[in-house]
Amino acid sequence: MQSEDTIRIVGQLDIVLRDRRGRIKARRRVKNLVTTVGKSVIANRMLAGPSLGAMTHMAVGTGGTAPAVGDTQLAAEIAGSRTALTSATNATTVTTYVCTFGAGVGSGALQEAGLFNAASAGQMQNRSTYTTITKDPTDSLSITWTVTIT
């Protein structure tokens, strides 16, 4: 009898909002959705010469519409919020992406975040929505996005 493997991809965001003095104003820990396009990117990255790029950026937005597997962009990405990752690391089956949206970047009533493989357009691997976090222009927001393959 042949055994069968089941692969599952699970993501989680840890979001921390800090004021200009570094004091924590808000925290969120939320699960995310891996999009159909994101699954294609992951599969493509297993090739010796992948044609789709690795994840390099995050963006935030004000769209509160629940994530759907067919999503290809955020519902309402804040212009200028697409920010290069601070770091991307891998340990066995866990990949961790970190990004900080500094003062003046991605301000507003935030309700969504996305993980992308380009500074503009590109493919969105993951999308998450959360209860509103109001980021003032002097605040900083850090997101640690953990993707686990089991």
Image: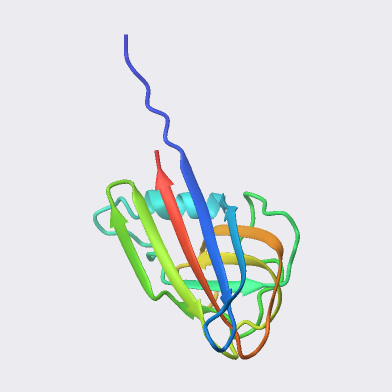
**Quadrant location of residue 59?**
bottom right
| In the foreground, 92 or 56 | 92
Quarter of the image with the N terminus in it:
top left
User: For the view shown, which residue lies furthest in the top direction?
Assistant: 1
| In the foreground, 103 or 23 | 23
| In the foreground, 7 or 53 | 7
**Quadrant location of residue 137?**
bottom right
Classify residue 78 as left or right of residue 89.
right
- Note whether residue 96 is visible: yes
Q: Position of residue 135 (x, y in %)?
A: 66, 80
The residue sitting at 50% across, 51% down in the picture is 11
The residue sitting at 75% across, 63% down in the picture is 64
Considering only vertical position in the picture, is 96 above or below 60?
above
Classify residue 76 as left or right of residue 49.
right
What scheme was used to colour the molecule?
rainbow
Quarter of the image with the C terminus in it:
top left
Considering only vertical position in the picture, is 53 above or below 36?
below
Q: Position of residue 116 (x, y in %)?
A: 49, 67
Q: Position of residue 148 (x, y in %)?
A: 41, 47
Considering only vertical position in the picture, is 45 above or below 137?
above
| In the foreground, 17 or 52 | 17
How many numbered circles are shown? 0
- Note whether residue 119 is visible: no
The residue sitting at 44% across, 52% down in the picture is 147
Q: Position of residue 68 (x, y in %)?
A: 67, 51
Classify residue 31 as left or right of residue 88.
right
